[in-house]
Image: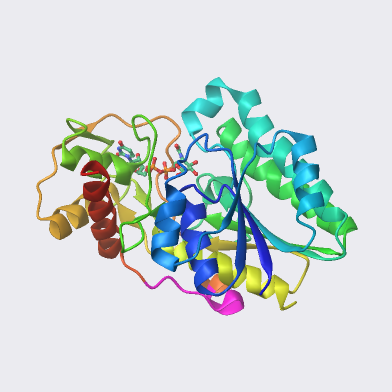
Amino acid sequence: MDKILVTGGLGFIGSHTVVELQNEGYEVVVIDNLSNSSIEVLDGITAITGKTPTFEKLDLREKLSVEDFFKKHTNIKGVIHFAASKAVGESVNEPLLYYENNISTLVYILKELKKLPETSFIFSSSCTVYGQADELPITENAPVKQAESPYGNTKQIGEEIISDTCKVTPSLKAIALRYFNPVGSHESAKIGELPIGVPQNLVPFITQTAIGLREQLSVFGDDYPTPDGTCIRDYIHVVDLAKAHVIALGRLLKNKHKSNYETFNLGTGTGSSVLEVINSFEKVSGKKLNYKIVGRREGDVISAYADTTKANNELGWKAQLTLDDAMRSAWKWEQVVRSR
Ligand code: UD1
């Protein structure tokens, strides 16, 4: 079976994707620098799949190490590239760290892939490229808006770098997957989201509040022009998202793609408000969440949810799991992690 490199394969979405790749029989090599992940994630992957992926601790900013890696692993058929920094606030304070981590590394990998006779490349992009879209749900044709942060800019520039490279490199086949809001964890609770420090994202903040690590969740604004006044997002279960990566990779490996650079939205197609997410959590956990409404958070868009038609029709992929499933698994994971 084909050998696939997963960069950032011990991170949140990366680890779930490694599980799905191994379940489909792929041979997986993981690169991770462990800057925002832990080596124990390998044990979780092994416990779920019965197989341990090959692991190389490597920092992709080290160009020579990247070259050496590809000299050593000559038969890589595809790459799923997750390794990147993703904290919006941090990116504002440390733009060069973000451009180096997210852009230099991408260039180094693509330079190596250009040398191969044929290769398939999946890029972690984000719905952040659309900003506040003018029309909802958001299709892949919606214009890319001026980025609000260096983090968002790295996703836009990353897509452009890949698209430009594909134009002059017929041997390179690539798909950029634009994720909406990935949440939840594997149902086994052997892998999941492990934010370092205070979580910036809604769901880990909810579960950490419920378990007593945080005193109270702040709901950022209830005066938005939405039905209940809170912001709307498209929360997609990470297992559904991981499966989409395997399907997208298969599309390229089997030459089912329509052009050698494609983009797909990955969401459920349904928007949920912050209060709906809290309600879902309270329902599945049976716990009352301590939260209060505070002022708006700077940079938040009002509403974003995916038009999934292209992913449904072209990839043949559709999210199967619900928001309740995601909240149930996130809560189970939080309880397992804290009892370790
Ligand atoms: C954020 C980033 C986005 C990035 C994504 C990565 C911003 C503005 N956007 O998306 O670029 O791709 O994370 O995962 O940072 N909320 C609360 N209280 C909280 C936390 C969040 O009310 O403590 C609300 C937010 O206002 C938002 C929703 O929950 O309406 C989701 O927030 P979050 O999980 O941070 O995701 P995004 O902002 O959509």
The reply to whether residue 139 is in sight is no
Magenta-colored stretch includes residue 330: no
Location of residue 286 by image quarter: bottom left
Quick one: 116 or 144, which is closer to the camera?
Answer: 116
**Relative side of 230 to 257, left or right:** left
The reply to whether residue 205 is in sight is yes
Q: In this view, does 169 lie above or below 50?
A: above
Q: Is residue 277 above or below residue 325?
A: above
- The residue at the point 85 percent across, 54 percent down is 114
x then y, percent, for residue 290: 13, 38
Quick one: 284 or 4, which is closer to the camera?
Answer: 4
x then y, percent, for residue 218: 24, 33
Location of residue 248 by image quarter: bottom right
In the picture, which quadrant includes the C terminus?
A: top left
Quick one: 136 or 70, which is closer to the camera?
Answer: 70
- The residue at the point 31 percent across, 63 percent down is 188
Q: In this view, does 83 lie above or below 285?
A: above
**Relative side of 273 to 181, left or right:** left
x then y, percent, for residue 261: 75, 62
> Where in the image, quadrant-wise, is ligand 1 located?
top left
- The residue at the point 62 percent across, 31 percent down is 98
Q: Give the range drawn in magenta.
A: 312-320
- The residue at the point 55 percent across, 67 percent down is 21
Which color scheme is applied? rainbow
